[in-house]
Image: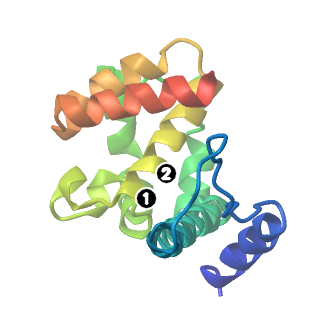
Amino acid sequence: MMDVLPKAIIHHMFTHAISKTSSARPQAVGATVSAADEIVRSEHVIETESHIGAVRDLMFDVSARLTGRAIVHDQSKLEEPERSILQAYPRKGGPDYGTPEYYERLELIRPAIDHHYELNSHHPEHHEDGIRGMSLLDVVEMLCDWMAVNGENDRVSIHESIEHSQKRFGFGDELKALMVNTVGELVA
């Protein structure tokens, strides 16, 4: 139901907002259009509109899936065993990401962290193959998660977090550049 509901909502929101591509083609003054040109143009228009519709449907599906993820993001932190452990070690005022103290804290809350990683695919630790086992949807959710955490703590920038995470999770410069570019687009 979670995958269907957001897709239906998004489809409804955009159905009336998007107008069909006009089939009218500007003509030069005095130009004539042959029947053969009209047939070719019609085939082109049909193929192009079909392609546009297919891309639009896939993008709506991606959007719906991201919406579903947004709705359930980190809900496991509100349930046991995560809830009581994380309440005992609040993140606010805790150590900065990437510091030795950060990793010491992770060990103190290991049962909660292991449970969290097991249930949440936007963490590389969820996947046997780490970040290479993730989908783009996982990566988008992970980046949004990092951005939100950085918004709560102004001591470490999102760019520093991406830099440290590249070393920690072993992803390449291409993914790093995509993340940096995406951050730039989202905060613009």
Q: Is residue 102 left or right of residue 19?
A: left
Q: Callout 2: few (<14), some (14-19), or many (20+) C-alpha neighbours within 10 Å?
A: some
Query: What's the residue at 70%, 73% (across, down)?
Result: 6
Foreground pick, 181 / 148 = 181
Answer whether labels 2 and 1 touch (C-beta < 8 Å): yes
Q: Which residue is mark 2?
A: 141
Q: Is any atom of residue 87 visible in this view?
A: yes
**Which quadrant: the N terminus?**
bottom right
**Which quadrant: the C terminus?**
top right
Q: Secondary structure at mark 2?
A: helix
Vertically, is 182 above or below 161?
below
Q: Is any atom of residue 79 visible in this view?
A: no
Q: Residue furthest top?
A: 155
Whole-angstrom CA distance, mark 2 to mark 1, is 6 Å
Q: Which residue is mark 1?
A: 137
Q: Secondary structure at mark 1?
A: helix
Vertically, is 114 above or below 8?
above
Q: Which amino acid type corresponds to the residue marked 2 in the rendered image?
A: Glu
Position of residue 132 measured from the top left corner of the image (x, y, whole percent): 19, 54
Query: What's the residue at 38%, 43% (across, down)?
Result: 108
Residue 7 location, quadrant = bottom right
Q: Which amino acid type corresponds to the residue marked 1 in the rendered image?
A: Leu
Query: What's the residue at 47%, 22% (across, down)?
Result: 158
Position of residue 3 measured from the top left corner of the image (x, y, whole percent): 60, 79
Query: What's the residue at 55%, 28% (across, down)?
Result: 185
Position of residue 155 measured from the top left corner of the image (x, y, whole percent): 53, 11
Q: What's the mark number on residue 70? A: none
Q: Nearer the viewer, mark 2 or mark 1?
A: 1
